[in-house]
Image: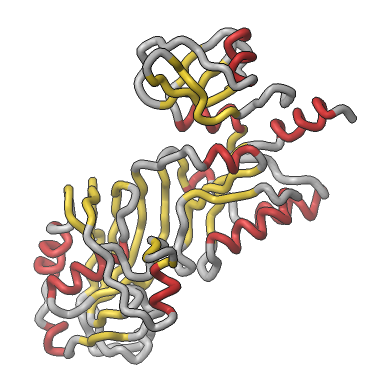
């Protein structure tokens, strides 16, 4: 097999897979499973999900991994359940309880108060990220420090909550079954459409503080990240079954060509310009703003390019010379 044919095989195996992440696994755990399923070490993910969370995790395979470094999913959607009555160190049900409301405090809550507290979280807001986020503090992930007993308080930053819908509010009862012995609770089922960098567990914490009873997440599911939707996602078991049944890697959700033209606007280029880009050369600008996918007449997405001054230069070459 020639080097050119081998490289071409890499392109055919390159792209993205939308995984429906199960609860209890880290994003790195998912990557490890996908490396076995797809038979390659070149696998990575975009947009970390907490172990307790489920839903959309976008995984890159082969050169799709390098492509993911350039993808910014500006908006995300989640379904979540928020439980009121206790604040925890992790802002979810797995963390140590920091404070707990009295049954009388919970009994005083009304659906209207809960709705109004959530309403304050809509729009452009300043949000303090959860202390168990992946944000780095002096070179260490915040969640690593918290789990070592370090008190981490991250600075607030601007985020946008485009929409926050409260579907149901379950008011307190005397039944404490399933609450981990934390007493009566109030729960709310919500859906959130937000900018990248928004923490749903921070919304739970802040609404709990606003109500004076504490709050934390008990369930979180990411239903979309940018153009990637849970309707297109496959579970790890489904992906593994294909491998087991056929002894071949399952199909990608998106080829590299499709991924590039889905995530970025297209600049059509000639075959000759495509060849130039594959060699690392630059093109003349045409007045296009931002990053574009350079696509040849035969549908090959050759590179991501961005205009700066008198050049339209590559920021990512999908098909270096010799890979077709």
Question: Residue 176, position in %: x, y?
Answer: 31, 88
The answer to which of 185 and 13 lies nearer the viewer is: 13
- Left or right? Give the position of 190 relative to 282: left
User: Hey, which quadrant is residue 103 in on the image?
Assistant: bottom left
Which residue is drawn at the image coordinates 29% and 53% (left, top)? 192
Q: In which quarter of the image is the C terminus?
A: top right
User: Hey, which quadrant is residue 97 in on the image?
Assistant: bottom left
Color style of the picture: secondary structure
Question: Residue 266, position in %: x, y?
Answer: 46, 20
- Left or right? Give the position of 4 relative to 252: right
Question: Residue 263, position in %: x, y?
Answer: 46, 32
The answer to whether 59 is drawn above or below residue 168 in the figure is above
Q: In which quarter of the image is the N terminus?
A: top right
Which residue is drawn at the image coordinates 35% and 75% (left, top)? 90
- Left or right? Give the position of 68 relative to 220: right
The answer to whether 238 is drawn above or below residue 73 in the figure is below
The answer to whether 138 is drawn above or below residue 258 in the figure is below
Which residue is drawn at the image coordinates 44% and 15% (left, top)? 311
Which residue is drawn at the image coordinates 59% and 36% (left, top)? 254
Question: Residue 264, position in %: x, y?
Answer: 44, 28
User: Hey, which quadrant is residue 237 in on the image?
Assistant: bottom right
Q: How many marks?
A: 0
The answer to which of 322 and 263 lies nearer the viewer is: 322
């Amino acid at each position: 097999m020639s080097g050119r044919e081998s490289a071409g095989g890499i392109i055919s195996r390159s792209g993205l897979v939308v995984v429906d992440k199960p609860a209890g696994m880290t994003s790195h755990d998912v990557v490890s499973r996908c490396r076995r399923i797809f038979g390659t070490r070149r696998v990575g993910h975009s947009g970390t999900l907490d172990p307790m969370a489920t839903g959309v995790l976008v995984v890159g395979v082969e050169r799709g991994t390098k492509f993911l470094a350039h993808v910014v999913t500006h908006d995300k959607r989640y379904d979540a359940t928020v439980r009121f009555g206790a604040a925890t160190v992790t802002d979810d049900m797995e963390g140590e309880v920091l404070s707990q409301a009295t049954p009388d405090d919970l009994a005083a809550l009304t659906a209207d108060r809960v709705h109004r507290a959530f309403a304050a979280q809509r729009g452009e807001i300043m949000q303090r990220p959860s202390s168990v986020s992946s944000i780095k503090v002096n070179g260490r992930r915040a969640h690593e420090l918290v789990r070592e007993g370090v008190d981490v308080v991250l600075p607030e930053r601007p985020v946008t909550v485009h929409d926050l819908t409260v579907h149901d509010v379950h008011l307190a009862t005397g039944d404490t079954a399933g609450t981990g012995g934390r007493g009566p609770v109030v729960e709310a089922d919500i859906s959130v459409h937000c900018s990248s960098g928004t923490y749903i567990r921070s919304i739970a914490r802040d609404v709990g503080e606003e109500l004076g009873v504490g709050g934390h997440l008990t369930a979180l599911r990411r239903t979309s990240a940018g153009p990637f939707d849970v309707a297109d996602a496959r579970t790890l078991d489904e992906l593994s079954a294909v491998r087991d049944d056929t002894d071949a890697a399952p199909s990608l959700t998106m080829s590299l060509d499709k991924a590039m033209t889905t995530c970025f606007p297209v600049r059509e280029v000639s075959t000759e310009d495509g060849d130039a880009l594959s060699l690392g050369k630059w093109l003349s600008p045409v007045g296009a703003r931002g990053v574009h996918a350079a696509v040849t007449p035969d549908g090959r997405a050759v590179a991501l390019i961005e205009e700066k001054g008198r050049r339209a230069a590559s920021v990512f070459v999908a098909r270096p010379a010799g890979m077709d």
